[in-house]
Amino acid sequence: MPSIEELKNFIIYERVQNFTLAANQANITQSAFSFQMKKLEETLGVKLILRSNRGSCLTPEGKIFYKKICGILPELVQTIYEFQQKSSEKAIELKVGVLTSLGDILMNQYVTYFQKNKNILITVYSMEKNELIRSLNSGKIDIASSFLSDDETLENFEKVLFRRDKMVYYAPNITEICNTISIQAILNFPLVKYPPDNFMNKMIDQYFNIAGKVPVVAAQLPSPYAIIQYCKKNTAGALIAERLLNTLGDSYKYGYCNIDPSYTMKAFLLYKKENPKYRAIKLFIDYVVKLNKNNN
């Protein structure tokens, strides 16, 4: 009988019709992927994929086989996951990708809760926005946690708003600030930002569009942790999610102030409803939404 991995990878191939892309989405080498497809054909006794120097495509038999298994396989895999979840010996692994600027440290409480209560193993990956979307689309992760802009549409995924994160001005070495700092005052000090192609720069620039200009850039760093450390050692400020600063501990709670006008970013959980781990995904999302119900 074919393995579930072979069947899942055959479905991946049907989506992209390219061995290189399919192997990349399956997270295996191209030679290993090609071997799996040949083994599947040998097991079934039919040619599923037509190969030539110009590329490859499904044979008529391959198209028929795809139509039959694409409806059966997700239900079969989901049934397996459900029985694994009922067993105390086998936890279901949920792979969660977190936007780097959202802060992967915030996932710790979710990981601990599900280890103790729901027999779900949470594996966390820190990713940039484009990588998050690609990984969710290819099945490398089951859930993505990310800020999204108001004008963003993601038709391939279900999305759930789980909190609105208040942004604050973190500048422990700028003594002139007090409880609240205006956007005009922020313009007087160097600002630490993300690299130019980072999604968060777009979100931060939207805020400064109110003033029609942006502060002088002190540094461009890849993560909120690097930005926070830079601000701790230099006379510069940054827009950081208040929740992240509070999670990092008491030493970070007193180096920031509110901004005027205020600014919040919407944080979403993204997933595919047809994912065979849907029930576990739903448990995770319901818990996260409930935990953050006072921040919506």
Image: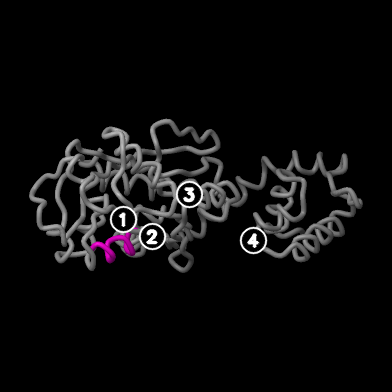
- Please provide percent x and percent y for residue 20: 74, 56
Whether residue 230 appears in magenta in the rendering, the answer is: yes
Q: Which residue is mark 4?
A: 27
Per the model, the C-alpha gap separating discs 4 and 3 is 25 Å
**Residue for badge 1:** 192
How far apart marks 2 and 1 lie (CA) works out to 7 Å
Tell me if I can see residue 117 in this picture: no
Could you tell me how far apart the alpha carbons at marks 2 and 4 are, in whole angstroms?
A: 29 Å
Quadrant hosting residue 265:
top left
Mark 2 nearby-residue class (10 Å; few <14, some 14–19, many ≥20): some
Residue 270, relative to residue 174: is it above or below?
A: above
Marks 4 and 1, the one that precedes in the sequence: 4
Q: Which residue is mark 3?
A: 197
Check disc 4 and report its element: helix, strand or loop: loop
Work out whether mark 2 precedes mark 1 in sequence or the reverse, and give the earlier one.
1
Q: Write down the region rendered in magenta.
A: 224-231
Q: In the rendered structure, find residue 221 and report the number of the disc placed on it.
A: 2
* Tag in front: 4 or 3: 3
In the rendered image, residue 153, in percent from the top left (x then y), is placed at: 48, 32
Q: Is residue 198 visible?
A: yes
